[in-house]
Amino acid sequence: MAILIDNDKNIFTLHTDNSTYQMQVDKYGFLLHLYYGRKTKGTMDYLLTYADRGFSGNPYDVGPDRTYSMDALPQEFPCQGNGDFRSPAISVRNGDGSYGCDLRYQGYKVHKGKYGIKGLPAVYADETEAETLEILLEDGVTKLQVALLYGVLPGYDVITRSARIINAGEGTVCLEKVQSACLDFVTGNYDIISFYGRHAMERNFQRIPVAHGSFKIGSRRGTSSHQYNPLMILARPDTNEDFGGCYALSFVYSGSFQGEAEMDQYKQTRVLLGLQEELFSYPLKAGEIFYVPETVLTYSSQGLGKLSQNLHRCYRKHLCRGKYKETARPILVNSWEAAYFHFDGKLLYELAATAADLGVEMLVMDDGWFGKRNDDNSSLGDWVVNEEKIGEPLKDFIEKINQLGMKFGIWFEPECVNEDSDFFRAHPDWALHMPGRKPILGRNQLILDFTRKEVVDAVFNQVCGVLDQGNIEYIKWDMNRSMTDMYSAAAEQQGRIAYDYMIGLYDFLERLMARYPNLLIEGCSGGGGRFDAGMLYYTPQIWCSDNTDALDRIRIQYGTSFGYPAGAVGSHVSVSPNEQTGRSASLETRGIVAMAGVFGYEMSFVKLSEREKDIVREQIRKYRTYAPLVQNGLYYRLSNPFEDELAAWEFVSEDGTEVLASAVMLEIHGNMTASYVRLKGLVSGTCYQEQESGRIYDADALMEVGLPLPLQCGEYQSYQYYFKQVRQ
């Protein structure tokens, strides 16, 4: 069993195949955290220590015992106002204006299968793969209840955390801070790994020691953001890719968030992840329930590589949904960098015809097909096909594309609106805006008030009106600005807007999936501004970044790989010199980098030479072979492109019989030294044949010493090796 209850000691133990999580209800009814780490037997209550902690308060019911303080004890769901001065998981403003909460244990339930969360994305699993533990806590004065939810997926080494907060009292209370997961460690030194960035340079790797004080990341932008990703890793200082203990916390949510790592006065470490507390103040009336977004936890004693693989496998199989969950995605060409806004039906057809000849499987018509949209200053909200620009009804145009043997996809930005649009002129109050103030503009557009059902319904009906016109098999769902002007005329309390907006967005996406079950949706927010586990529940792939420069993409995809599977990473070959950086790289190198994700193109094939077209044909042929391995194989980082002179990565099938290793030289020098790429994950004691050269290699030698890369002049040389296991 995954969940064990020791009723004598009131200890709850959660076991996965390789980890153990343990907590205890003590004699005062506080739920204390005991242990999370390598799989163990027995009970860990001996780890708790008690001493007179000066200036650390004591609960009234412990009497004269000054050794008992919430300010020093490890907790499962720490509250503000019970004597713990560290950062809390929950802060409550009561009806009388006071701040405080004192949650005590009331009972528990265990059931087979994985819990779900009303209106929110979450990991799912059936009764054979998961168990759920629910622990009920209550404040004895206000009757505020918190049902802590733990989902245990043993085979994936994953434990999920969420909560339902129920106002079982008579008056209104206000939630001022809510985190979905807290980990308290009574001992140990740790590093915190986070992923920072900016538009067109997302998810850069950062690793720093956890020191006294608080380290905080987060987003106040209404999206999970380009600037910080809702993923944190806590690792022991000696942990690397292949060795050492580490923990991942991944927030299954696409809006504003915050994560904290804090070392307290006693060298204890607390890590929290959940909703952004700024601009959050959520009133809860008597009888109402607040659903807390989920955090996925996983532990590895075998380094960061295994930690990432735990998340990858869980998200591929138990978060992504739909027809394309684990099947190969179509290789597409997107019209954006091929034409930007300046296209017509003839140009798109030429692009599709050339692409079809090369073996591309889908044409995606990006921004510019609707309303009077010839730049980014008008028409968002007017989701009506510009037939004059395309030259014919959309249905007829799609049929022409399908007759080429190509699928057809289309771009939308449903959450935003231009002031210069018929939609806005008809409903100016449907955009978020503050009374009496001019709005903040982003890309000359505003954000629609998705907290209001009538707004969501109106946009949904427009989008469906387009999708029903023809055989549209793919949507690129974009969102190109941060959320400001946080005011809704329909809201009872403005502090609930950011959360309610996400509920409206998720409702839209859920309805879209239900109506079009075979539709592939690719998430996007100016590229990687909403690359998070929450979106993967609705969009099994996400455009990784608006930056298509191959060298920058290596670093962006490296950071992304710590928390997200390659099958979720939209990655395309674009022109050289690159239009974002001006850097040049060979078509071969650009292709190899793009094959580290869901492969496609972002260019005009019409401009390619015959030699380049032959290279594209070969890339497509290869990727069709590699796609199942890239999408469902185990991913290994073989180098650190922020530190090493080469970038290398690898995909290995779960049974170890198939291997794809790729490398790009990031530096070149005179009289260059040889570079060796050490492979991982091969079956020891066997041999592998490299399919292009036919050469056979010993698996242990490839893992111990590696494969030497050719010594070649020229910038950004790239190499790709495809192996199959053979018997010797």
Image: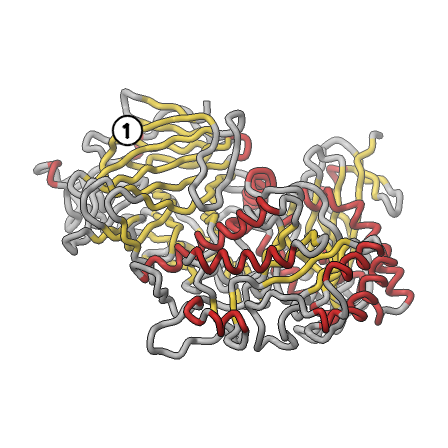
Question: Is 427 placed above or below 555 here?
Answer: below
From where the camera sits, is residue 164 visible? yes
**Badge 1 local density, few (<14 within 10 Å), some, or many (20+)?**
few
Q: Using residue 309 as the reference point, say whether residue 660 is left or right of it.
A: right
Is residue 193 visible to the viewer in this orientation of the structure?
A: no
Q: Which amino acid does label 1 sit on?
A: Gly
**In the image, residue 104 lies at what x, y percent?**
22, 36
Q: In front: 466, or 585?
A: 466
- Please, is residue 196 above or below residue 129 in the view? below
Secondary structure state at the residue bearing disc 1: strand
Residue 508 x %, y %:
51, 52
Say which residue label 1 marks: 107
Horizontal side, residue 320 vs residue 439: left or right? right
Q: Quadrant of the C terminus?
A: top right
Residue shown at the point (22%, 33%) measured from the top left: 29
Q: In this view, does 142 lie to the left or right of 530?
A: left
Query: Which residue is situated farthest in the left direction here?
Result: 64
Residue 25 lies in what quarter of the image? top left
| Residue at x 21%, y 37% (from the top left corner) | 50
